[in-house]
Each structure stands twice: as C-alpha cells, then as structure tokens.
Image (cartoon, helix red, strand yellow):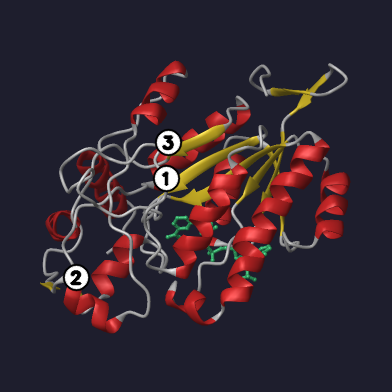
Amino acid sequence: MAAPNGTNGTSNGHSRPLRFLIWGGDGWIAGHLKSLLQGQGKEVHATTVRTENREAVIQELARVEPTHVLNAAGCTGRPNVDWCEDNKEATVRSNVIGALNLADCCFRAGVHCSVFATGCIYQYDDAHPIGGRGYSEADEPNFRGSFYSETKGHVELIMKHYNNCLILRLRMPVSDDLHPRNFVTKITGYERVVDIPNSNTIFHDLLPAAILLAEHNEVGVYNFTNPGAISHNQVLHLFKEIVRPDFTFRNFSVEEQAKILKAGRSNCELDTTKLVAKLKEYGYDIPEVHDAYRRCFKRMVAAGVE
Ligand SMILES: NC(=O)c1ccc[n+]([C@@H]2O[C@H](COP(=O)([O-])OP(=O)(O)OC[C@H]3O[C@@H](n4cnc5c(N)ncnc54)[C@H](OP(=O)(O)O)[C@@H]3O)[C@@H](O)[C@H]2O)c1
C-alpha cells in the first residue's frame, strides 16, 4: 500500500484526505492516539464497536469511511493479564477473533490497519541472552507463559500475511504522566520488583512514529520500542533522581515473583534495527531507552507530575 503523504491511494486511482478511525476508543493507548492526531490537526474518529462483531465492524467502516484504522482494542485483563488465565474465551474473542476480523474487514474495504500489538511474546534464551542479541521481527514467538501472550503470539503469525496491516509490537509502555497503566506507575507502586533489562515503549517518542508509518501506508511487523534495554532498577533510580527524591524500592527474584502471579511475565530485548532504519527514511530518530527515560522524567517534572 503505497501512497503520497497526506492522501491515500484508492482502488479507483483517486486520492482522498486521510481519515483515521481508532478502535478500542475508550482505552488508554486509544486516548493517546486520539489526542496526538487531534494535536496534528488530522481528522480522527474513535469507536467502541466490538471487533469480533463482523456485521457491526463492516457497518462502522462503511459509515466512517476511514483511510486508516488504528486498532488499539484488545483484552489486557484487569487488574492485569492474570485475568486472562481465568477468562480464556473472552480473551480469544478479543485478541484472536476480533483482531483478525478487524484486519480482514479493513482488507476487504481497502483500508490500512495499524495494530497496537505486543512484543511480550519472547523470553530471554541461550541464543538471546540478557545483554546479547535482541529478538528480530522474524523470530518465532517463544514465550507462552501467559494466555494473554499466547493469544498475541498466535494471532501475529496469521495477521502478518495481510498486506494492509502494520503490526507494531509495543512493550511496557510509558506515558509522560503517572496514569495507572503506565509501566512506571505500576513498578513504583509494587511492594517489590524484579530487576531485569527489558525493551520499553515511551509514547512521546513512539506514538508519533506510529502515525508517520501509518500515513505512509507502511505494512509488516515492527518491534516498536526505544532502542536498547533498561532494567527495572535503572528505571527506578532515574525516577528517584529526577522525579521523586524520597522514593525507595525493594527487589525480589523472578522465583519469588512467580509465587504472587498466576501467569508468567515476558522479559526480553527486541532488536529495533528495522524500525530505526525505516524511521530514518522519514528523518525521524528515536532516542535510546536510557536517554528517553531521562527526557520523559524531565517532562514529567516540568509538567508538575510528582
Ligand atoms: N498497556 C500495555 O502494557 C500494552 C503493552 C503492549 C501492547 N498493548 C496492547 O495495546 C492494545 C491497547 O492496550 P491499552 O493499554 O490501551 O488497553 P486498555 O486501556 O485496556 O484498552 C483496550 C480497549 O480495548 C477495548 N476492547 C477490548 N476487547 C475489545 C473488542 N473485542 N472489541 C472492541 N474493543 C475491545 C476495551 O474495552 P472493554 O474494557 O470494554 O473491553 C478497552 O477500551 C491492546 O491490544 C494491548 O494488548 C498494551
């Protein structure tokens, strides 16, 4: 799907202005996408139509006539992904049936579909150890420790064959506020934390990149994180240094953590070579994750977040 920036090629050869439709309209990431697009002066609509309801999805696409769908709908579980272990059918309905249905309806309607997917489908192994080579987009998912991750890993293997889909693998997303879904809010609120390096997605840097890729009709799978990996302790030390000087925290081991969780959690580093190279084509750079955190925490302080 290639078309000039600002317009979208259509099957009859005409171009029309971009119109974004965000799915999962009431969600956290959806809210950020909507504000970002509005701030850029783009035409944006949001919907809460269930993705698995094929007739309703087709009707919504026909009603809004978007050039681009941003799929930020998904079952993430409340208070966390442990919920998915006990609600497997509902998790499949949203993360497998719904995600594929929306991709397919967009395909049939000639609409580009960006999917806010996850990189929590890998775990460190001998070939990808801590501090070693990160997982590339071509690596098969190898983390099935949670049902949430299992659904996401399976669906990506199918969805990547749709030539209208841009699959963006986010990990441990971080916003510039202390929203409850922010990874920093989560780990600063825990009694004890593990200390493992991971790839993280800082919204300030990555969400504008998502819009850039979508409006250029890029497709395929992208590891969608800041380059590099940062450990929990490094995040918390930076938080203490920049945001909250009296902050303290305690660690525990992965084995101890496993005792308080129903499902396992993915820990891995993603290789961002493909993403960085693609964004360079558009003159867009993403800061390395330690640098990105420093900037993020400084923005928090400047905005009065404590
Ligand atoms: N936050 C993270 O840590 C993270 C990391 C990587 C990837 N992601 C992915 O990014 C996407 C958005 O995450 P988020 O953090 O914004 O989660 P969120 O705040 O829970 O938002 C997800 C939204 O999707 C809606 N939804 C769920 N199933 C749906 C369905 N079948 N049809 C239509 N809407 C549906 C939910 O509505 P209801 O509550 O009414 O069901 C909710 O409003 C998810 O797919 C998630 O897996 C998130």
Identity, as a three-letter code, of the amino acid under mark 1: Glu
Which residue appears at 14% of the width and 54% of the height? 234
Residue 257, position in %: x, y? Answer: 22, 76
Residues at marks 3 and 1, CA–CA distance in whole angstroms: 6 Å
The first of marks 3 and 2 along the sequence is 3
Whether residue 241 is situated above or below residue 6 in the rendered picture? below
Whether residue 104 is situated above or below residue 258 in the rendered picture? above
Where is the C terminus found, in terms of image quarters?
Answer: bottom left
Asked whether 234 or 82 is in front, the reply is: 82
Residue that mark 3 sits on: 138
Asked whether 299 or 118 is in front, the reply is: 118
146 to the left or right of 186? right
Q: Secondary structure at mark 3?
A: loop
Residue that mark 2 sits on: 254
Q: Is residue 25 visible?
A: no
Residues at marks 2 and 1, CA–CA distance in whole angstroms: 24 Å
128 to the left or right of 209? left
Residue 121, position in %: x, y? Answer: 40, 54
13 to the left or right of 234? right
Identity, as a three-letter code, of the amino acid under mark 2: Val
State if disc 1 and disc 2 touch (CB < 8 Å).
no
How many C-alpha atoms fall within 10 Å of the one at disc 3: few (<14), some, or many (≥20)? few
Where is the N terminus found, in terms of image quarters?
Answer: top right
Residue that mark 1 sits on: 140
Q: Secondary structure at mark 1?
A: loop
Residues at marks 3 and 2, CA–CA distance in whole angstroms: 28 Å
Asked whether 40 or 50 is in front, the reply is: 50
Residue 174, position in %: x, y? Answer: 36, 54
Identity, as a three-letter code, of the amino acid under mark 3: Ala
